[in-house]
Image (cartoon, grey):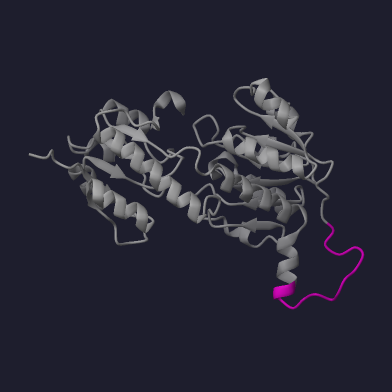
Amino acid sequence: MPSRRLSVVVTRRLPEPVETRMRELFDVRLSESEAPMPREALAEAMREADILVPTLTDVIDAPLLAGAGDRLKLIANYGMGVDHIDVATARQRGILVSNTPGVLTEDTADMAMALILAVARRVPEGMAKMQEGDWPGWAPEALLGMRLRGKRLGILGMGRIGQALARRARAFGLSVHYHNRRRLHEGLEDPLEATYWESLDQMLARIDVLSVNAPHTPATFHLLNARRLKLLKPSAVIVNTSRGEVIDENALTRMLRAGELAGAGLDVYERGRGVNPRLRELPNVLLLPHMGSATREARLEMGERVLVNMQTFADGHRPPDQVVPSML
């Protein structure tokens, strides 16, 4: 007799080719909704499934894991970040966690570079004037921004995305500086002509543009607090395509309102969808709805990595993209 196909619950709509392949391989319950799965439904799924396929909008904490059924053995996350999953508790309960690293690198780096260009050249302010019909015509002193060539870019978090951004920045004539938990191997650092700063404070005081590319962990929560943000030049701009919790959003808002920073481009927020309303009012801020990885190619590749992790697990092996607490 054929072996029982593993039971899988998917919490959100995924690209059609990914869902179809899952149907072919597993006993899958797909979501018909674009909205996040309610917590009660998520708890029920975790009691019944062998594999759960969540997204970043599904907070899988210790209480939910405590109620998981004995069958649940793999949480195959559709996405790279896993700060919404209590990985340590999952491991204690014998539940593996996997993610989809690498597939978002180029797209997120593109978005970070786009935000740098847009904020440095005051694109949002120019767009607002045109859309409001408030353009009096060209003037020598109107909407003067920052020339990027010759400026210093500071990258906070020099992983795959940080390095991809550094390659783009070099093409625009930016000097690359970075702070990371560990210095890059010279084989990676030298081609980028990147300057490493062990002291984040010292780097912040010297750069013109700051890009946040660090994950959210207990160690990085409010890493950019009010004191550190004040180290930046008043002419500096800051962009964040990583995790909103890395920045003290209230402190950032106060500084932008006071003219202590030139501008900001944000794709992520400290409270998820709860964007600080004062940020919306600022003309020198570009706000995006978490679009960093929003390409058709990335969404399909994410699904393919999920499928590889699921099938490897079903074959009796550890998923290639397994996440363990020591990695966080």
Q: Is residue 111 left or right of residue 151?
A: left
Q: Would residue 13 be seen by someone viewing this image from the given angle?
A: no
Q: Is residue 93 left or right of residue 179?
A: left
Q: Is residue 269 above or below residue 193?
A: below
Instruction: Write the start and end of the magenta stretch as one range.
Output: 130-144
User: Which residue does the image show at 34% across and 46% down from the upper left?
Assistant: 54
Which residue ends up furthest to the left in the rendered image? Answer: 1
Q: Is residue 172 above or below residue 35?
A: above
Expressed as whole percent of the image width and height from the top left, the position of residue 61 reads: 33, 39
Question: Is residue 111 highlighted in magenta?
Answer: no
Expressed as whole percent of the image width and height from the top left, the position of residue 144 reads: 85, 58
User: Which residue does the image show at 72% across and 57% down from the upper left?
Assistant: 284
Question: Is residue 134 highlighted in magenta?
Answer: yes
Q: Would residue 92 be seen by someone viewing this image from the given angle?
A: yes
Expressed as whole percent of the image width and height from the top left, the position of residue 146 reads: 82, 51
Which residue ends up furthest to the bottom in the rendered image? Answer: 133
Expressed as whole percent of the image width and height from the top left, the position of residue 313 reads: 28, 33
